Amino acid sequence: MQRSKKILIVSHCILNQNTVIENEARAAGAVHSAIVWAMKEGYGFLQLPCPEFTFLGLNRPSMTYEEYNTTEYREHCREILKPILQQAKDYVHNDYEITGLLGIQSSPSCDPTRGIFMEELTALFAENGIHLQTLWYLPNTNDPQFKSDVHFIK
């Protein structure tokens, strides 16, 4: 089968809700609707590490953007992004397209428009000549009746 050569960078918790803080998970495991959507689009996944989990562990407290907005946390984000950057560079070098970024609305780290981790990711990638033109997000909701839809930002 022919490869699509389209790579979607995905926030860790979209594929693994087990890393989300207590009472904030949107699914039992992966967010099914996001996976189905990405598969229909023909995207391969480049899963990001969870910066909050790797920084404070599984039993971390709920924190805001402002609380995570520290030099120490931003440095941590950049450090754990190094292997992801190398993988992205290898994809680009081999004529793959980094199609975009899928994040989580209202996450202090992984909201594509205002998340510490996403700010560091887009800056680090831009510094290395990889510009993410397309951003998507999953709405922030814990309503069990809600079917998560992927929303386009730009």
Image: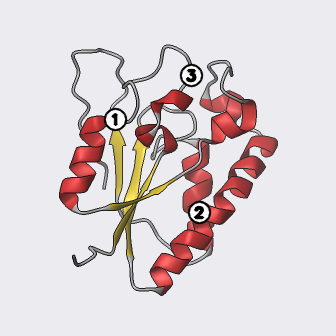
Residue 87 visible:
yes
- Could you tell me how far apart the alpha carbons at marks 1 and 2 are, in whole angstroms? 21 Å
- The answer to whether 103 is drawn above or below residue 66 in the figure is below
Sequence-wise, the earlier of marks 3 and 2 is: 3
Q: Amino acid at mark 1?
A: Val
Q: Amino acid at mark 3?
A: Ile
- Could you tell me how far apart the alpha carbons at marks 3 and 1 are, in whole angstroms? 15 Å
Element carrying mark 2 = helix
Indicate left or right for 46 with 115 as reference: left
- Could you tell me how far apart the alpha carbons at marks 3 and 2 are, in whole angstroms? 23 Å
* Quarter containing the N terminus: bottom left
* Residue 90, position as x, y percentages in the image: 53, 79
Indicate left or right for 103 with 110 as reference: left
Element carrying mark 1 = loop
Query: Label 1 belongs to which residue?
Result: 31
Residue 126 visible:
no
Query: Label 2 belongs to which residue?
Result: 84
Whether pointer 1 and pointer 2 mark residues with C-beta atoms closer than 8 Å, the reply is no
- The answer to whether 135 is drawn above or below residue 7 in the figure is above
- The answer to whether 44 is drawn above or below residue 53 in the figure is below
Q: Closest to the observer: 90 or 109?
A: 90
* Quarter containing the C terminus: bottom left
Query: Label 3 belongs to which residue?
Result: 21
- Residue 5 picture quarter: bottom left
What residue is shown at x 49% (from left), y 86% (from top)? Answer: 93
